[in-house]
Image (spheres, rainbow, N blue to C red):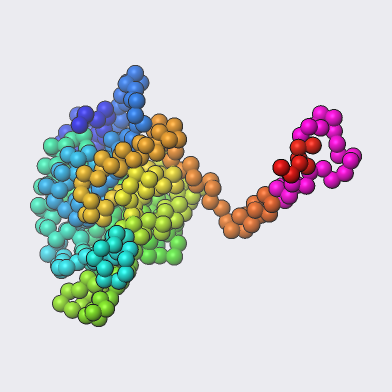
Amino acid sequence: MASLSFTQIRGKNPVAEFSRTRPELGLTRPNRVGFRVFASESETKAEPDLSVTVNGLHMPNPFVIGSGPPGTNYTVMKRAFDEGWGAVIAKTVSLDAAKVKNVTPRYARLRADANGSTKGQIIGWENIELISDRPLEIMLKEFKQLKQEYPDRILIASIMEEYNKAGWEELIDRVEQTGVDAFEINFSCPHGMPERKMGAAVGQDCALLEEVCGWINAKATIPVWAKMTPNITDITQPARVALSSGCEGVAAINTIMSVMGINLTTLRPEPCVEGYSTPGGYSSKAVHPIALAKVMNIAKMMKSEFGDKDYSLSGIGGVESGGDAAEFILLGANTVQVCTGVMMHGYGMVKKLCSELQDFMKLHNFSSIEDFRGVSLEYFTTHTDLVRRQQEAIQQRKAVRKGLQSDKEWTGDGFVKETESMVSN
């Protein structure tokens, strides 16, 4: 793979050639965006350019490994970089991995065929998996190794901690020292340890979210994305709070709380662990329309209230093709994350995603991602406005079919067109 033409330079990065200091806190929003060096304009490409620069982070394409099993250790994250993914978000880490106890089986699938079928296309995927159960020290060592071996690639750490300011500050400090490029804050895991005020327990409580975002953004010196839960009435509310509290971006959506199904032979729920189960997070193709709606709502809010320029949006949910990704980008997403898709199709799927996205861009003569990002947002409106628009269109069509209403409407200049307007074949 050709080397990237520019990348982020951050303080505390072992490969940085110069450092920068965090700006003084004041009335203006802190700037944690890195420096960029652009390639010569003479270096033109025949193919559409998939590269994106988000919050100062340069990626060769907008496809990002979503936090979860595909980013659980050095070996798999290295594989993702080697296959060509634009960035990798590691599996969520916290200070004390000892409290994380996973079970097996922890996944269940929904197929397009009847309940219990093993043949139909997989359209839904449920997991009851928790965050990383690996000791933080090991994950930190692997983050550092990855950044040393891939200094020009983007590695994002997903972090989650209990409701404790000192704990958050310690976690941020220790992870930043590895040289990671950004944080994604897990405010959205729908299961596991809500009693500790972790994951969705924070993302569903805007007052709590504002407080915790304040702690995080006062400490972090690299870009921060807040990952949103869809398990809430209005997803724009926590997204607004996160951005107003200093986060550079939001990611949406995390998985949807679900019960995958009941085995009609055993009468037990799936995934079944010693005869029992618990509600988990739903993902894969079936959540894609829901994710599009959530991303659309966030993007419209960001555009109207934040200007959509200094903030980023990462779309997540059911991406298995370049067309799926194009839909998120058309709704305003800067990047597109894939997690369950990788678990089903492997890391090599990024080549297919890039090829299909470029085919879409060629079809519409788009040369860059920014050429079409957010283009479809303007076509969403209220149902009341849809009724008004249709009534006006019907009246216009009726007017065309009726032609002239009386002889006094004939004109000399438009005589031929006026005649044609009253011909039936």
Q: Is 333 on the left-hand or right-hand side of 347?
A: right
As drawn, the residue found furthest toward the front would be 425
Residue 166 lies in magenta, yes or no? no
Asked whether residue 197 is in view, the answer is no
**Residue drawn at 81 percent across, 32 percent down:** 415
Q: Which residues are magenta?
A: 395-417
Assign the C terminus to one quadrant of the image.
Answer: top right
x and y, in percent, of residue 413 in the image: 81, 29
Q: Is 304 on the left-hand or right-hand side of 266?
A: right
x and y, in percent, of residue 264 in the image: 27, 78
**Residue drawn at 16 percent across, 37 percent down:** 150
Dominant SS in magenta: helix
Q: Quadrant of residue 54?
A: top left
x and y, in percent, of residue 38 in the image: 32, 26
* 7 shown above or below 322: above
Q: Is 154 on the left-hand or right-hand side of 42?
A: left
